[in-house]
Amino acid sequence: MSIAAHTIDATHFTPTALPVRTPRNRRIAKAEWTKLRTLPSTWRTVVMATVISVGLGAILCVSQVQQWSKMTAGQRQTFDPTACSLFGIVFVGAVVLAALGVRAMTAEYATGMIRSTFAATPTRRRVLAAKAGVIAAFVFPVALLTAVISFEVGQLIFTGKHLEVTFAHPGVLQAVVFGALAVSLIALLGVGLGGLIRHTAAATTALVMVIVGGVTLGQLLPAGLRQYVPGTALQAAVTVNHSAGLLRPGTAIVVLGVYAAIALAAASFRISHRDA
Amino acid sequence: MIEANHLTKRYGKTVAVDEVSFTVLPGQVTGFLGPNGAGKSTTMRMILGLDTPTSGEVRVDGKPYRQLADPLRSVGALLDAKAIVGGRSAANHLMWLADSNGIPRRRVAEVLDIVGLSDVAGKRVGTFSLGMNQRLGIAGALLGDPETVMFDEPINGLDPEGILWIRNLMKSLASQGRTVFLSSHLMSEMAQTADHLIVIGRGRIIADAGTEEFINRHTAASVRVRAVEQTDLAETLTQRGALIECASDGAMVVTGMDSITIGAAARSHDITLVELSQLGSSLEEAYFDLTKDQTEYHAGQLVDATKGA
């Protein structure tokens, strides 16, 4: 690096040499998208989420097929091949992909880069909104693709017992789309938790507690309330055959949306009212 | 231009920045000097709208920072070179910054060239040395071609070549008419780089003056003198109001009197001088004295004395 040479011709640019006028919200979103896609860990997470989700879904489907002969008539009646094949993506894939949302916030707080972000965009609510929007827009297609693969793999496994369903069956398409939607909402919950807690490990733990731990702790709640626990609502979102103790899929999506909104609103308040 | 007006930041009972008022003018390098913990970084964070002042205000180009439309086009700042997510490449880091303020992406390559990082543009930032991170941070500050640049301790962790580079860069930015504001806790470095000094200690401004003026005012001149009739000379000079200390080698160090007066006094008393030399007290010493215990000084008085500067 030749130092002196750079210094001389270094700064010969004029302030007028910079045009480009795009609406501010689009610029902020573009910056957040650039951040997300230029981190190699983003793509590793996507691959990991897909592999784990499809794999776990397949394992559950195989175990259902093996247990089929031992099931009661009632159990066979309520068996939901769609929900079963989507178990991996809505339960574990959601947590893995939501970690992207968590890290979108916490990685910047952990390093202090959040100050560069807020210096570049002083309207912090817009930064949070842009992060949330970009995460949701990124996670949704990933989750949808993973859900479709999981569904197809699961149905392939079910053909042995002739249990398979297709997209032509009523409710199946909705379940797959709702599955991806639910995962996106959990990713938004991750953004909110990341903005509130600011430490990667702590915020990720909180997320896992809310999703996985919540289901266990939900057993202590009265049956009427239990169905509103985030993890249970996730399961409900992908059901085709309605089962007792679970919300209707549409209601489940609304409930998950409320959780995400609360977390984001709290994070927004904290971000705007505290020094960076 | 940066204007701080009674800027104050309190954390509970601790006052980090206390009623600070100053103006940083374009076309010169202004050094923000003070010991660690004096309030430099807090002040800079308030300038950038990152910390909210408890009271008072600070404006950049006449506006509070948060009201600037595209801040990076007005103010480029480097606060902490290590505050960067390590997984991205240098070019990609600058790219999101450019995107956030609608700066064309071709500027990324330009600023990487300015700071001499073109060769490592595609390398992960996490693998960078502190010096390389400093350069990347400076590239980020220059990205929007801003009128005002601000750097917090930019020479920390740099090798001598890097220090020289920064010094020249600051001077060239100022010569283009930009406002250049940089903090340091090193007096000697500031003396060589800055045209103007704002000295802060314990959250208060204790000096605000041109560098040369500051040096002249705060480096008390003393004279080293030795005579054949040493005792007579000491007596004579003391009578005339000089302060005398004895150096270990037998010479006297005289303060409060210049060498011409001493020479004339010696001649009028027929004293033979063996040695007569002007000593400049070190600027570093002066700065240390000024900031070591700020409560010993009446800040208001010093600020008043420098208001005309």
Image (cartoon, coloured by chain):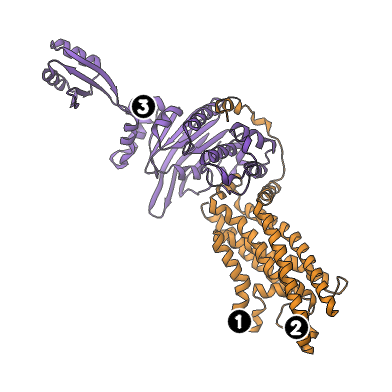
Is disc 2 in the same subunit as disc 1?
yes
Residue type, label 1: Leu
The numbered mark at residue B215 is 3
Element under label 2? helix
Residue type, label 3: Ile
Is disc 3 in the same subunit as disc 2?
no
Element under label 3? helix
Element under label 1? loop
- Label 3 marks which chain's residue? B
Which residue corresponds to the image point at 84% horizontal and 77% vertical from the top-left?
A160
* C-alpha distance separating marks 3 and 2: 88 Å
Residue type, label 2: Gln
Return the x and y of residue B61 as percentages of the image width and height: 56, 36
* C-alpha distance separating marks 3 and 1: 74 Å
Q: Which chain is represented by purple in the image?
A: B
Is disc 3 in the same subunit as disc 1?
no
Tell me, yes or no, if residue B306 can be seen here.
Answer: yes
- Answer left or right for A122 relative to B276: right
Which residue corresponds to the image point at 48% horizontal and 48% vertical from the top-left?
B53
- Label 2 marks which chain's residue? A
The numbered mark at residue A67 is 2
**Label 2 crowd bin: few (<14), some (14–19), many (20+), radius 10 Å:** few
Return the x and y of residue B141 as percentages of the image width and height: 58, 38
CB within 8 Å, label 3 to label 2: no
**Label 1 crowd bin: few (<14), some (14–19), many (20+), radius 10 Å:** few
Q: Nearer the viewer, residue A168 or A67?
A: A67
Tag 1 residue: A221
